[in-house]
Structures are given as structure tokens and as C-alpha cells.
Image (cartoon, grey):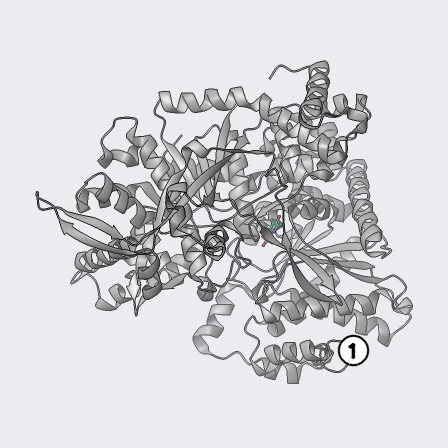
Amino acid sequence: MQLTKEKIIQDFKMQLHEDFMIKNDEATADERFIALAKQIKCYVMPDWLRHRAEIVKEQKKTAYYFSIEFLPGKMLQTNLLNLGIYDLVQEALSELGVDLMDLVEAERDMALGNGGLGRLASCFMDSLPTIGAPGFGNGIRYKYGLFKQKIVNGYQVELPDAWLSSDGNVWETKKPHAAVDVKIYGNVYLVPQENGDLKPVYENVKTLHAVPYDITQIGFNNDVVNNLRLWDVEIPEKYELDYPTLADRRRIEDITSVLYPDDATREGQSLRLIQEYFMVSAGLQTIVTSYAKMGLPMAQIHEKVAVHINDTHPAMAVPELMRILIDDYNLEWEVAWATTTKVMSYTNHTVLSEALEKWDAGLFKEIVPRIYQIVGEIDRQFVKTWAGKVDASVIDHTRVIQNGQIHMANLSIIGGHSVNGVAKLHTELLIEDVLKDFYLLYPEKFNNKTNGIAQRRWSQIANPGMSALLDKQIGKGWRSNVHELSKLEEFLDDAAVQHDFYQVKQANKQRLADFVKKTQGIDLPIHAIFDVQVKRLHAYKRQLLNVMHIIKLYQDLKDDPTLEITPRVFFFGAKAAPGYHFAKSVIKIINELANLINQDESLRDQLKVVFLENYNVSLAELIVPAADVSEQISTAGKEASGTSNMKFMLNGAITLATLDGANIEIKDAVGEDNIVIFGMDKDAVYDHYARHDYNSRHIYETNPRLKRVVDAFTDGTIPNTQYEGYEIWDALISYNDEYFLLEDFDDYVAKQAYISELYKDKNTWQSKAMKNIANSGRFSSDDTIELYAREIWGIL
Ligand SMILES: *Cc1c(COP(=O)(O)O)cnc(C)c1O
């Protein structure tokens, strides 16, 4: 794009006049942010229109990524960077006496996701246009994003995240003319037509008006612009009489009101099911209509359209596409099925059985009666196809409807041509264990696509200090080709370079320490190891193991007041699902332990604990560059991939990890000397499952050092946590420690001690950190999405 500083200044002033009737020096940061964002939209528009016209004209096959969550965070810096005008705009603003960072500050985080799943979707939205692939997002425009977390008396309190201003979101464009109707509830009858076909007739349905909001997704330095389409619900004028009272209207508006605040367990509420159908139906109707305009046979839609089911929430895409093809376009079942299965593909994100989505068939039938009929037929056809060919037990375990429940993963697998896991180990586990019966039926569908991260956000935007240093050391090529980070390998033993990286890290730690001082009033020593665990709070992620190690250090220091340890600051950032009792108790424990430790002067600043409130993408951008140690300590086999592990690696933290998810691939990338591994591997965990021989009480009773740590939860060591302490003690001892914290404890403590020793040797430490940066290129979501594009969707 050809832009000059003068033009940017002129446009910026003009935009302020137009929107706010105001001069720059009178404008607030909010107003300036909005003006700049609108200006960017104008700059992007020609590329967007041209790119879309090209896709239509060349009839390019397009992938649609259906996801109930997107977690982009802020967009201003990414958009400036990808347009190649970051520095220019920064300079232009500074001529006007405006600091770009104040505008960045003014933007609200777009948090339409819970954690890793939604963040991955957003990394893909950044990478798809960057690799020049026609790939569009499809989701829901929630009025309230993931709850805002406040800590009050150590407890998590959830507040609504009203992220939309009264004018909406500045990056979006409402498209009322592209609205579609979605039908739910009512009765459906199949009525024979003159030609013998059965046609559905609907009675007493509720009609929802789905209105799209489009957000442009800008490729990095390549003039490619894709689209993220988020759907909002409205009540159509012609059906207003169906919703006569205010309460009726509110019930409809609720459909796009809030994101479900939990990505691991299902609350089974009908609203969620309506949300899922709403977004799937609106998206697919639009896709099929635009395909129909090409004038190609409907039976070949798979040649131009790929639909991706990101986790099971959009699984109704399978029966919905069948419905459209059969009911609206009169395709025969077999023909519709053949093309539908070629259109659909599915990513599995979890092996936790409680997170495998199932719906009560009765509820399903009530809310989406026609879809229920089609799912029933899919189930019958499936059973018919496999009967006599495989064991009846295999069919029983894989069919869609079992014991009055609809299994959404089964629907996604049967109804598509590809099933992928998100890290090598995870895909292996799907094949060997979780989905092994499906692997018997469809081995060819299974493949792995290890997750990746949008490297530009997690380096160039989040860590400008390191980026400048990389430019100096290895040239600027890495900014567009992250594989060039490997050039850093040459300097691993260069003491001067090591020192420079150390300086950058210390500056980032200072930036975080200043934030903590400002927000919580705690002074942090930046010569300490910054040891970080930030992610959703979940038992399997084992924040509690981290806590147990902190308790041990605390007890050691109290036992011997002269003891010298390598100083540590432990950081936690984590939201707990509002209904997840245990997770909330862990938050309370962390906060009370932090109070206890931070106020104890006898510890002489050797130990600090910080709980960072309201962990989100923007906070992650502050925290990740400041980490020395990245805690990735889930029970082996439980974390599908993890992506924060990749962000930390890219920013030169040393990973302390179990052999779980993508940690294994990080180890392969950096070599075992440059990562610290502890604990049981997946086989050891599965051996316990097979033998039923795990006995946490035995470990507790035979390991006095560990026993003292566990007893600290109930013996009054941590103030104000009597109730929570007992709950945790019970989970660990009475309920046999489901996630094996006790068995892994000793090795974890030993490896933490090793880290403390290692950190004393700054050169060696820094060399290992640089080794991590140098090998992080392989975790770029640009590469990941290229594999999806080629191997699953066939769009490149
Ligand atoms: C990357 C990221 C996650 C995922 O973290 P994991 O440790 O991989 O679970 C969650 N939330 C936010 C805000 C993130 O940026």
C-alpha cells in the first residue's frame, strides 16, 4: 500500500472531524483509537473488495472455519503490522504528539473465547490470509465476551464483559442485506409430493433473523484480506407477532448474549444448543447460496467448499448441510451424503471424557426437529452400512445416537472425511484409545495437525525489545519468515549476544513488575526467576502441583531462616469456570498463599507469589515476554497440545514440562538439554489406569516431606482457607488424587531445584533460552494452517 506520513496525518485529522467534530488535541485516546481504526478499514477496503472479487471470478475453493469461539484480543497493532504501516503510523501520530500505545491501550479485548481453542481459531484467522489461502471464519457475535475476573478477598468474582461500545465494534461491518432466517422449535411432518418425494412441512416454528457482522482479516504484507463473519440474532419484522412480550424478545436476544464460560464441561442448557444451530445454519445457508450462484451442480459442492468443524460445537453442520441439499435442492440422500462427507472435516481438542459433547435426544428433537430426523437417518444408515462387517460392539460405541443421547463427536467423524488431533501425542491417543473404534472403521480419516501460534503477535507485537535485538543479530528476514530464527543458532555461545538477550529479558521483567506494582502494590525483585503458569484453571493442568512446590519452598525457608535460595517470583493467571468449584478453591488458595508469603519479611524477598487478575490475550502479551520459566505441567496424556508453551518458547523462556501435548515436540525441537522434563509419561499414567494400582494415600503416608506439604492445606498454614484446604486435601488423599500430583511431586521439586542452580549461570541459561527462540519457527500457525489448507481442505 502506498501511503505517506502526510496522508496518514491528514486522514486521521479528517476522521476525527467527521466522527467526533473534534480536533486532535481535544480528542481522548478512545476517540483517537476509533478514528485510526476507521482509517485502517478504509485503507483495507480496496484489497478486500478486489480479493473477494477474485475468489468469485476464479471460483476458488474456499474453506470456512466454523468455531463457537474466537479470541483475537486486540486488533490495532496486528492490523498495522500486517498492512506494513506500523512504523509509519507510529511516526505520523508522534508528529501529532500522540503515542500509539495510548490508542492500543484504549482498544477493548475481543474475548469471544475461553482459552486455547478460541485463541487457536484467531491465530488461524491471522495465518490464513498470510499464506494467501481463501479461508473464512464463521462464529457468533456475543454481546458479552468471557466474563471479567475480579479477585475479591481472594475469591474469583465474575463480572460481565461488556466489550461492545454503544456503536458496536469498530472493526466490524454490519451486513443487514446478507441476513438469513433460521428456524427452531415446532413440528415437522414429511408430506409425500406428487412425484413421490417427501417434503418437510413446518408447524409452529420460531424464526430467528441471523444478521452477519464482518471483520476483515488482513494478511501479512501481501494485500490479501479474508473475512471473519460473526452472527447476531434479531427478531424479523414479519415475525414480530411471534414474540409479543418483552420477555419473549429477551429470550431470543439471549441467543447471542453470552459465550459459555466453560470449554471443558457442558452444562447441557438448551440455549447452547440453539447457539450452535443458529451459527451453523446461518453460515451454511449463506455458503450454499453463494455456491449456487456459480451455477455448478449441487452434488459437487465439495469441489468449491470445505467446512471445518472446530471441536464438536459446530457438529450440526453435517445434518444441516444434508437438510439444505435434500429439502432445498432436492438431492437424493446418497448423493447429498457423498458430497457432505467430502465437505466436512473435524478437529478434536480434548481427550477428557467429561468434555465430549452429548445432547439429550428429547431436547434435540424439541429444538431442532428436522435436524433430529436427519441425525436419526444418519444413524440408521451408519448401522446398516457396518452391520455384519464389524463387531456389534464397535457399532454400539460409534453410532451417533446411543441411549437417548446424540454424540456430537461421532456425528463429526462419521459425517466428515478428516479427523485430526492437535499434537502428535494427542493424535496417537485418539487412535489408540479415545477414538480407537472409529480408527478401525475409518483409518484413512485420521491425521495430526500440531497447533501453532501467530508468531508476529507473540514476538513482534508482544516483544519489541527482543525483536529489535533479533534484527540486529540475524537481520530482519525472520519477521516475514520465522524459520530464519534458526540463524540465532550461530550465536548460542557468544557471551556478548547472551548478555544482550539477558538485558532484553530483564527489561521485559521490569515492565511486568511495574504493572504489578501499579495494580497490586507489590514490589518484585527482577533478579529473581520469573516463573509463570498462565492458562485456564483446571485440575488436569495442575496449578496445584505448582502451589505444592511453593509451599515446600516456604516451609524450607521458615525452617531455616538463614537459607539462601535462588529468588523466585511465581506468577499465576487463570480464570475458573463459574461452576467449577474445585478450580475456584485453587484460586482462593493461591491468593491467600500469596498474601501470606508476600507479607512475610523473614523471607527476605526470596519468594513472591502473584496472581494476575483477569488473564486474557492482552495480559498474555505482557506476561509471556517476561517469563524465565514456562510451567507446562499437566498430567501426561491430558493436555491435547497447549499453545502457551509455544508462546513462551518463542520468547526465550525455559520450559518446565511433563511429556504431554506439544511439550514433546518442543523437546524434539530444542533437544533435551534445553528443556526440563519431569514426571510420569503417558505410558506410566496409562499403566496406572490399567492396573488400578495408584494409591495416593500410600505415597502420602510414606513420604514425610510431601506429607508436610499436603497437610499445610489443612493445618492453618495458609490463612482463611479452612474450607478450601479440606476440599483440596480430600481431592488429593480421600479421592485418590485423580491427576497424580503426589507421584510426580518429588521429581517436580528436584527439577525445580535444578532450575534454581541453572539460573545462577547466566551464560548457560541464556544460551538455552536462545536455543529455544532459534527453534520456535516450526510452531508458526502459518505452517500449521498451510497443512490444513493442503491436506484437509484442498484450497491451495
Ligand atoms: C495462548 C492462550 C491460552 C492457551 O493457553 P494454554 O496454556 O495452552 O492452555 C489461553 N488463554 C489465553 C489468553 C492465551 O493467550
Quadrant position of residue 708: bottom right
Q: Look at the image and tell me in which quarter the N terminus lies.
A: top right
Q: Position of residue 698 (x, y in %)?
A: 60, 84
Instruction: Report the number of numbered marks.
Output: 1
User: Looking at the image, is 783 positioned above or below residue 512?
Assistant: above
Query: Which residue is painted at 78% across and 25% down in the image?
Result: 24
Give the crowd class for mark 1: few <14, some 14-19, many >=20 residues within 10 Å: some
Frontmost residue, 457 versus 493: 457
Frontmost residue, 508 versus 655: 508
User: Looking at the image, is 208 positioned above or below residue 589?
Assistant: above
Say if residue 222 shows up in the picture. no
Query: Which residue is painted at 41% across and 54% down in the image?
Result: 274
Could you tell me the amino acid type at mark 1? Thr
Q: Position of residue 92 (x, y in %)?
A: 75, 21
Say if residue 137 shows up in the picture. yes
Q: Position of residue 659 (x, y in %)?
A: 56, 59
SS of the residue under disc 1: loop
- Residue 62 shown left or right of residue 637 in the figure: left
The residue indicated by pointer 1 is: 717
Q: Position of residue 241 (x, y in %)?
A: 39, 49
- Residue 94 shown left or right of residue 574 in the figure: right
Frontmost residue, 509 versus 19: 19
- Residue 103 shown left or right of residue 343 in the figure: right
